[in-house]
Image (cartoon, helix red, strand yellow):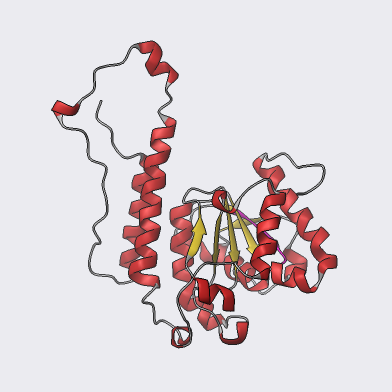
Amino acid sequence: MAHTTSDAAAKAIQAWLVNERRLGIGHVVRRATIAPPRASEETPERPASERDARSAAPAASLDSSASAAEALRVLDEQHVRTCTRCELHKTRRQTVFGVGSPQPEIVFVGEGPGADEDRVGEPFVGRAGQLLTRMIAAMTLTRDQVYICNVVKCRPPGNRTPTPEESAACSEYLWTQLRILRPRVIIALGRPAMQTLLATSAPISRMRGEFHDFPPPALAHLDLPPARVMPTFHPAYLLRSPNEKAKAWADLQEVMRALGIPIPTRPR
């Protein structure tokens, strides 16, 4: 039987093509396709018992994962890295796109890169990033099993909070990432990320600790995939206010319960 890309893979690529039109990009980028084998390469039919022992799901998952990874790569290399939509491009060393699984159940979204991230080109690698890694480990996960990114992809000078204009200029890249990734849960790290994702001006102290529907009504026109948003404190804030760590851990436990992840007796 000839192999074809899975429906999920096709949707991931289609999401990117649709977004290229949103961004006003006139060309279509060539992408790797998974071609069916030639007739001479067809393998003999396997016995029914062997076929039954092999699930089709892993192959479909691999196809979809490869397509999502390719769509993310094109977005990063051909658009984000050359972006000049706001003034942040003038002071950046490099853009900071995102890292992790192309098929995550959880996406962590922060506000923007800091000095360490601007130097390395990867989100959450400084002290706050080290704490985030420990938070993820406490959930019995690794950074490779989730996806990590920021609202803005360039470092605001002096590690300041991104302005609303900067967040708005960069938000379409975040929306495209989420269309491709299609997570079940988005963990908003800090007020700016939460306010962007939920289109609200509410303080995070009022919004954390419970799930919120995504996309919110104000973003319904963007054709974003449905998910649940859990706002929690940014790791940088937790470094300054360690007494708030218990609240952040409670937020993460709510996510674990929603996803059916066993909660350890003691966090790692």
Residue 121 position within the rendered picture, expressed as x and y whole percent measured from the top left: 49, 70
The residue at 54%/70% (across/down) is: 151
Q: Magenta stretch: residue 232 in it?
A: yes
In the image, taking residue 146 as reference, residue 11 lies left or right, namely left
Task: Give the x, y percent position of residue 85.
Answer: 41, 81
User: To which quarter of the image does residue 84 belong?
Assistant: bottom left
The foreground one among 162 and 215 is: 162
Bounds of the magenta segment: 228-234
Can you say whether 48 is above or below 6 in the image?
Answer: above
What residue do we see at 35% from left, 71% from top? 79
Q: Position of residue 37 (x, y in %)?
A: 20, 33
Q: Residue at x 65, y 42 (%)?
A: 259
In the picture as drawn, the residue positioned furthest to the right comes out as 243
Where residue 152 appears, as percent x and y from the top left, is 52, 74
Q: Is residue 234 visible?
A: no
Closest to the observer, 38 or 29 = 38
Nearer to me, 225 or 36: 36
Residue appearing at x 28%, y 70% in the figure: 25
The N terminus appears in which quarter of the rendering? top left
Decide if residue 218 is on the left or right side of residue 44. right
Q: Residue lying at the far left in this picture: please name it.
A: 40
In the image, residue 203 above or below residue 66: below
Q: Does the magenta run of residues contain 79?
A: no
**Left or right, 207 with reference to 195:** right
Q: Where on the picture, by quarter, is residue 132?
A: bottom right
By secondary structure, the bulk of the magenta-drawn segment is best described as strand
